[in-house]
Amino acid sequence: MMDLIRVFFILWIVVTHLNHSMVNVEGRHHPNTKQKKVSSVPNLPIDESSSTEPVASTPSSSIAPTPSVPSDPYPNDPENNTSDCVFDVRSFGAVGDGSADDTPAFREAWKAACAVESAVVLVPENYIFMITSTIFSGPCKPGLAFQVDGTLMAPDGPNYWPEGDSLSQWLVFYRLDQMTLNGTGTIEGNGDKWWDLPCKPHRGPNGKTLSGKCGSPAMIRFFMSSNLKVNGLKIQNSPQFHMKFDGCQGVLIDKLSISSPKLSPNTDGIHVENTKVVGIYNTVISNGDDCISIGPGSSNVDIVGVTCGPSHGISIGSLGVHNSQACVSNLTVRDSIIRESDNGLRIKTWQGGMGSVTSLRFENIQMENVGNCIIIDQYYCMTKECLNQTSAVHVNDVSYRNIKGTYDVRTPPIHFACSDTVACTNITLSEVELFPHEGELLDDPFCWNAYGTQETLTIPPVNCLSEGDPETVGDTSDYQCS
């Protein structure tokens, strides 16, 4: 009997041990994992002209094509990557002391990361890396991220710019798809010595420019690339434009800080040209020129939640220079602030141009001491020698809704100066209320050959806007865009 009890006891121990081992094995194969971080960013605007991109839901009930963007805005999060995918520039010889030339190390890190899917070129925090003019070119494997958590710095002015380096650009990203430029760090342009060149506006005696070396590099340029994302960075003190997009498709910009002094010349914040499907969101820009400028060949641009100023405002143009054709369409600016700026919402074209600016929406904009809050200028000229010409870029279908705040009384708050031969048409004003920041209310705004409607009474009243359609807007074939 005792032997039988002993046998059952031994069997019970064996079974219990086996069950415990199975539980441990199962646990080892299913470790607890944190969920991947998901970035909440607005949807890109829709490019209705494209039919080859994947489809996605839009705020309306319709289905329309939209370009893809990098799926994870934090590719260097340790929860999302293994160390094999992170290419720290220090591992390639970068010093990061702010004076050594780290350009070769950056080029080697880029070359290695370019060949690996979802790789990260890491610019680590607590270091200052100085590099010279460089083109980071593709094509690369998809999902490449250039993550700046430290400081990336340009040479200290023209005297330190290497001979043979391009004077038109500093950092260029070329022929890339699904690439992200992000991080928590700073990209420093060291622009002050470029701004002080004698050829720059207002730098010479009596406010005149002088002859001499004048070329200045744009800070960051994306060229012939697609499905790009830029977010989180501080970008400052560019010698010229801070950021340019040229020949691109699918751009998402979110939560940037862009800054340079109020009098720094030609330091546009974000310039978009020949680029389609662009979203610019939740970004603060203060600089010496346009905070955002939209050049020819741009369409489907969505600008939301931008704080702009001091600056020259948000500009479409200049367009049609040297009798060229310029086409801009489907642009929205909404829920934004413009403060202490020379201009607010501006459309500027040269005489003699062709093409059209059409389907522009400006909504829910707060103005704070802004000159020329609403302006269309089809007589744009940078000298006093421009000749009168008959052809013009046609401005059509532009609406201004809920534009409120204060203006600088030295300029009219509303200014529509349209071509003698090609009138501005289908301008809509609704809930426009602009008061003088200081001084007395100006009388009538200025209008010339401008046609449209006022859905509500405006402050100040715009009695000069012509109703209906003009008898002629010129030869329509001159401003049709394909």
Image: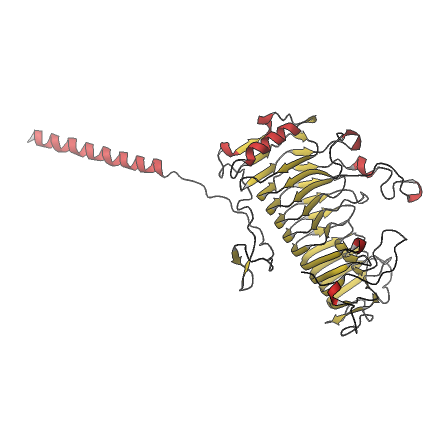
Which quadrant of the figure contains the N terminus?
Answer: top left
Q: Which residue lies at the image location 60% right of the left edge and 38% below the top edge?
A: 146
Residue 250 in the image, given as x and y percentages of width and height: 60, 51
Q: Vertical placement of 79 versus 481: above or below? A: above
Left or right: 379 as drawn, with respect to 65: right
Total marks in image: 0
Q: Do we see residue 445 in this rendering?
A: no
Residue 244 in the image, given as x and y percentages of width and height: 69, 45
Q: Which residue lies at the image location 62% right of the left edge and 28% below the top edge?
A: 105
Left or right: 173 as drawn, with respect to 2: right
Left or right: 240 as drawn, with respect to 152: right
Q: Vertical placement of 131 versus 458: above or below? A: above
Q: Which residue lies at the image location 56% right of the left edge and 58% below the top edge?
A: 51
Res 232 → quadrant: top right
Q: Which residue lies at the image location 58% right of the left edge and 34% below the top edge?
A: 121
Res 331 → quadrant: bottom right
Which quadrant of the figure contains the C terminus?
Answer: bottom right
> Given the current orientation, which residue lies at the most extreme right position?
206
Q: How is the image coloured?
A: secondary structure
Q: Vertical placement of 364 versus 125: above or below? A: below
Q: Do we see residue 450 in this rendering?
A: yes
Residue 478 in the image, given as x and y percentages of width and height: 75, 63
Q: Vertical placement of 401 versus 175: above or below? A: below
Residue 91 in the image, given as x and y percentages of width and height: 57, 26
